[in-house]
Image (cartoon, helix red, strand yellow):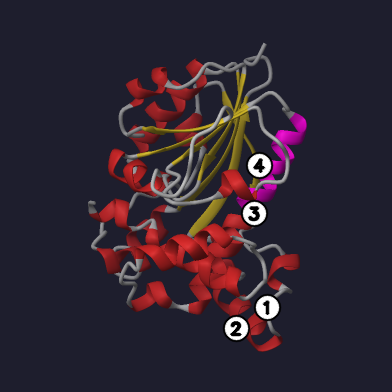
Amino acid sequence: MNEVNKTLFIPLYGKSTVSRQHIILNDPDAERIWEAESFPIRGKSKSKWLAYNMAMRARVFDDWTDRMLRKHKDALVLHIGCGLDSRCRRVKVPYREWLDCDLPDVIAIRKDYFDESVNYRMQALDASDPAQITALPESDTAIVVLEGLSMYLSKAQLRRFLGALQKKYRMLCILMDIYTEFGAKASKYKNPVNDVGVTKLYGIDDIEDVISGLGLQAVREHSFTPPELVNELKPLDRAFFKLLFTGRLYGKIYRLMEIATAPGRGG
């Protein structure tokens, strides 16, 4: 497993740690898989503040996916860069078809913990190769979860990837976290992923630089740390967490963007 693949253990640790506290995220699968894998987490990756942040990020993606499934009941859900995440089990709204995608080494491990079914499958996919998008299932509408993926693709790679998705599906609903260019530069030596050997990350200051001309539009920016989730922390933890993750500086480093098919392009 290469360095980028190993980064999946950081959010897995965070989700399992917070789930055991019975706050923010109910994720018994993360608890079970983390205990079984026993990956050596060290340095900033073991921070309880990062664990809170990873769990909140996951919960925001979960809640958004549920909202999209209520609006698009027959949509295909694509979780690309899924790692060992159990979102397919955490979402509350039933889905017609769900496909979890990641690099082959990750999917091989994932199959030790998740079973395929009529409406759930796993597929190896390299997001840096847009030609692989053609092998994804057919659907009129696709709900696309891109959590912890964009920062490992150059701007050109990400643009080609999103363009391939837009050509494949008539209607797209996408939620994607991104580093800013400042955030990517600052992360070279001050990011938990450094603990598993990753030092090269990519950032985006203006999402229009990536999606312009693709038939996509920016819908809105979401918060990683909604007040209702922050308020689940104990008072002292809540106060310190707010200093770390809810101020203006954090927003200049890391953002959560929703994009979708532009009006008139989806038929």
Q: Position of residue 95 (x, y in %)?
A: 67, 32
Of residues 158 and 71, the one drawn nearer to the viewer in this rendering: 71
CB of mark 2 within 8 Å of CB of mark 1? no
Q: Which residue is mark 4?
A: 65
Q: Earlier in the sequence, mark 2 or mark 1?
A: 1
CA–CA distance in space, label 4 to label 3? 9 Å
CA–CA distance in space, label 2 to label 1? 10 Å
Residue type at mark 2 is Phe
The magenta-colored residue range is 60-71
Residue type at mark 3 is Val
The residue at the point 43 percent across, 46 percent down is 204
Q: Which residue is mark 3?
A: 60
The answer to whether 158 is drawn above or below residue 133 in the figure is below
| Secondary structure of the residue carrying numbered label 3 | helix
Query: Residue 240 — which label?
Result: 2
Please, which residue is most extreme toward the top here? 267
| Secondary structure of the residue carrying numbered label 4 | helix
CB of mark 1 within 8 Å of CB of mark 3? no
Q: Which residue is mark 1?
A: 233
